Amino acid sequence: MNSQTTPAIELRATSKAFRTPSGRLHTAVRDLDLTVRRGEFVAVVGPTGCGKSTTLTLVSGLEEPTEGEVLVAGEPVRGIGDKVGFVFQQDAVFPWRTVLSNVMAGPRFRGVPKAEARERAREWLDRVGLGSFQDRYPHQLSGGQRKRVALAATFVNDPELLLMDEPFSALDVQTRALMSDQLLELWAGTGASVVFVTHDLEESIALADKVVVMTAGPATVKEVFAIDLPRPRKVEEVRLEPRFVEIYRELWSSLGEEVRITRERGAADVA
Ligand SMILES: Nc1ncnc2c1ncn2[C@@H]1O[C@H](COP(=O)(O)OP(=O)(O)OP(=O)(O)O)[C@@H](O)[C@H]1O
């Protein structure tokens, strides 16, 4: 296999168990097989607490699997790679730095000379519509604007792999839809592979090439849905298409069963 056909990510029979404070072993991910192709946008949905974030931490190299293999670009993951970008629910911005300085931080850390880092940062700030906000501090921005800074600060590093954990869940519905459109625009043409964890089924269908449904914990893959909707997509338009509604129904029925299992377990724990 050459480097173009090697998948971006492969999880092979991967399991992860944590030692809990009481000393017991808790299995968060069990026997998980998942392949993400180069340039593919994969959304991951599953019931709360099933192991979605744990799966991302395994791919990021923040945690090691207890069993199985995690390969990124065909190589076993060792530590956090330079070509991986992260966007989380909380804004990963430095509050004491200006917007421009925040976006320059990644390239500077990677050894890019200051003038070039500044130029690249300005370019990405323009792309996210924040060109005139570069001297502000994060607390002087709205939640949506801060998220755009976080996106610019991620894309400026030219990541090959983007790991996103409910990045837009703290935003209001309208801002969320705008951010999804913006993400698709920024991502188009980068060739980056994306793993996007969300609770929002509409968001997952609107964004992804395929949606992976996880089982009730410990997480394993229950079903994979190919999203055969044409690109480019606009979130507010694509969600009205009959095919979108059809996929939504199928996805909801697959996930709903796992949510019910998770709820019943929760009720049993309380009883
Ligand atoms: N470091 C850890 N030590 C012990 N248990 C952990 C640790 N990290 C996660 N877990 C447990 O593993 C399970 C999966 O957690 P994880 O955060 O991956 O779920 P999730 O699907 O992302 O949840 P949510 O949808 O609520 O964000 C949970 O039961 C959690 O309590």
Image (cartoon, rainbow, N blue to C red):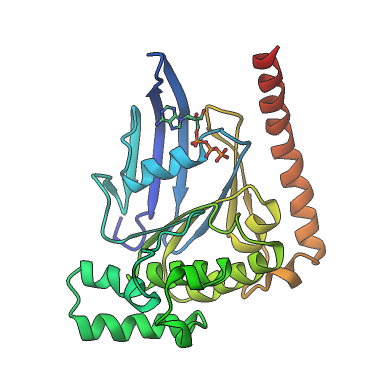
Q: Viewer-proximal residue, 45 or 68? A: 45
User: Residue at position x 64%, y 64% from top?
Assistant: 176
96 versus 61 height, above or below: below
User: How many marks overall?
Assistant: 0
Q: Is residue 132 left or right of residue 116?
A: right
User: Residue at position x 49%, y 75% from top?
Assistant: 186
**Residue 256, position as x, y percentages in the image:** 74, 36
**Residue 19, position as x, y percentages in the image:** 37, 21
User: Residue at position x 44%, y 64% from top?
Assistant: 39
Q: Quadrant of the C terminus?
A: top right
Q: Viewer-proximal residue, 167 or 61? A: 167
Q: Is residue 195 left or right of residue 46?
A: left
Q: Is residue 260 left or right of residue 34?
A: right
Q: Viewer-proximal residue, 233 or 113? A: 113
Q: Is residue 252 left or right of residue 215?
A: right
- Tell me which corner region of the image, top left, top right, bottom left or bottom right, holds residue 112: bottom left
**Residue 238, position as x, y percentages in the image:** 73, 68
16 versus 173 height, above or below: above
269 versus 245 height, above or below: above
- Tell me which corner region of the image, top left, top right, bottom left or bottom right, holds residue 87: bottom left
User: Residue at position x 75%, y 52% from top?
Assistant: 248
Q: Quadrant of the N terminus?
A: bottom left
Q: Viewer-proximal residue, 235 or 103? A: 103
**Residue 254, position as x, y percentages in the image:** 71, 38
